[in-house]
Amino acid sequence: MRASAVPRTHREKEIRRHLLLYAGVTPFLLIAVFPIFWMAVTAFKQEADLYRIEDLVEKPLPQKAPSNLAVIGRYILTPEIFEALEKTPPGKNNEIQLTDALRILAAEKGVYGKRLNGTRYDAGDKLGFLKATVEFGLKSPDLGKPFQQYLKNLKL
């Protein structure tokens, strides 16, 4: 299970909502943001759940994070991203980071974030992975009931 794993129907609804939002306010780039305790986006609220992204930071330390908004890997990008990637020098681990290219476009063209609602699971964290596994397992149409019974029978 990936950190961004979302039930397909919910993911498809979110993508449709992003596309409709993008179609209504082009031209700009749109990224999905999600509120958590700390994260990597400096943004200014435009309306309801739309933010103009001023800056992004790749995996900051919690005490240095600029906000509680995180980029969660859902993007609608225009072709300008390729030019920005070409201008982007290698960063962490000598890799070209999408975050750095988005920073360039945020300064030059404008990048917006659409706040997503729901639960975010951090499957890169052991406890987050277990929480996601249990919650999705319990919601499973074919495994939910037997899994719930198994959990009830555990000797804790």
Image (cartoon, grey):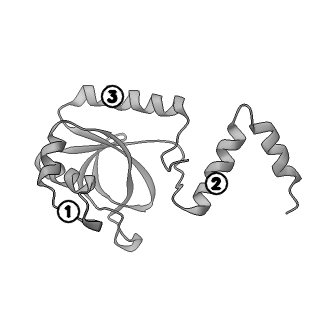
State the SS at label 3. Answer: helix
- Identify the secondary structure beneath mark 2: helix
Task: Please state the horizontal and vertical placement of residue 23, each as a whole percent of the image.
Answer: 26, 26
Q: Residue 19: which numbered mark, if any?
A: 3
The residue that mark 2 highlights is: 131
* Amino acid found under the numbered disc labelled 2: Lys
The amino acid at mark 1 is Pro
Residue in the picture at 20% in, 36% down: 78
**Residue farthest to the bottom, as pictured:** 63
Q: Assess whether mark 2 and mark 1 are in contact (beta carbons under 8 angstroms).
A: no
Q: Residue at x 43, y 33 (%)?
A: 14
Mark positioned earlier in the residue sequence (1 or 2): 1
Question: Pointer 1: what residue?
Answer: 90
Which class describes the residues within 10 Å of circle 3: few (<14), some (14-19), or many (20+)? some
Which numbered disc flags the more N-terminal residue, 3 or 1?
A: 3
Q: Amino acid at mark 3?
A: Leu
139 to the left or right of 21: right
Q: Is residue 127 above or below residue 119?
A: below
Q: Please name which of the two marks, 1 or 2, marks the residue nearer to the observer.
A: 1
Report the residue at 38% width, 46% height from top. Answer: 73
Q: CA distance from mark 3 to mark 1?
A: 31 Å
Nearest to N terminus: mark 2 or mark 3: 3
Q: CA distance from mark 2 to mark 3?
A: 30 Å
Whether 23 is drawn above or below 11: the answer is: above
Expressed as whole percent of the image width and height from the top left, the position of residue 82 reads: 17, 43
x, y percentage for residue 99?
27, 55
Q: Which mark is residue 1?
A: none
> For the C terminus, which image quadrant?
bottom right
Q: For the view shown, which residue lies furthest in the front direction?
A: 94
